[in-house]
Image (cartoon, grey):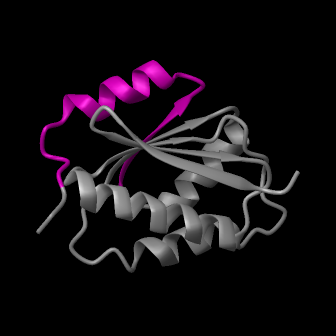
Amino acid sequence: MKGEVEVEADGGLVVARIRGEPSAEILRECQERVLALVREAGSGRVLYDTRAMESPASPEIPWFQRELDAQLGEIRLRRAIVVPDSRLAYLARLAFGTGDYRVFYEDLDAAERWLRADDDASLAR
């Protein structure tokens, strides 16, 4: 299934849902939309819901996310990534590297609690 992304603001969080097989174009679109909402809200709390995402066909996809993150500049993000299985958990760890993130297995509620627990995840100026 071709990848698609939906990004919205939800109660102080930015929620990005990725479905299907991600591509570099999908990741770029997701990043652009997430950053637009982060700037608008002034909060860097982002929840990635990847439970309906398939493993990417290309091994380069996680590394592309790292390239996108290298362009963040002064923007600080605290990210919770909700995954369906250990394969996507591993790929998420590759993609987000040493950033401020945590991976959750199928548990949206725990991911939201973790994001809301830290008041320091605001947009860096």
* x 22%, y 50%: residue: 43
User: Which is more toward the observer, 96 or 45?
Assistant: 45
Residue 84, position in %: x, y? 68, 32
Q: Is residue 98 on the magenta stretch?
A: no
Q: Spot the residue most to the right.
A: 1
Identify the residue at image location x=68%, y=72%. 24
**From the image, which quarter does the C terminus lie in?**
bottom left
**Which residue is at the front of the view, 113 or 95?**
113
Q: Is residue 34 above or below residue 117?
A: below
Q: How far across and how far down the image is residue 33, in percent? A: 47, 62
On whether residue 110 falls in the magenta region, the answer is: yes
Instruction: Report the span colored magenta.
Output: 100-122
- From the top left corner, tell me how far across and down residue 38 is, in percent: 30, 56
Does residue 21 sit above or below 88 in this rendering? below
Q: Is residue 59 left or right of residue 62?
A: right
70 to 1, vertically: above or below = below
Residue 75 visible somewhere in the drawing: yes
Name which quarter of the figure residue 42 lies in.
bottom left
Residue at 50% across, 78% down: 67
Q: Left of 52 or right of it: where is 122?
A: left
* Picture layout, residue 71 above or below residue 5: below
Residue in view at x 84 percent, y 57 percent: 2
Q: Position of residue 118 (x, y in %)?
A: 18, 36
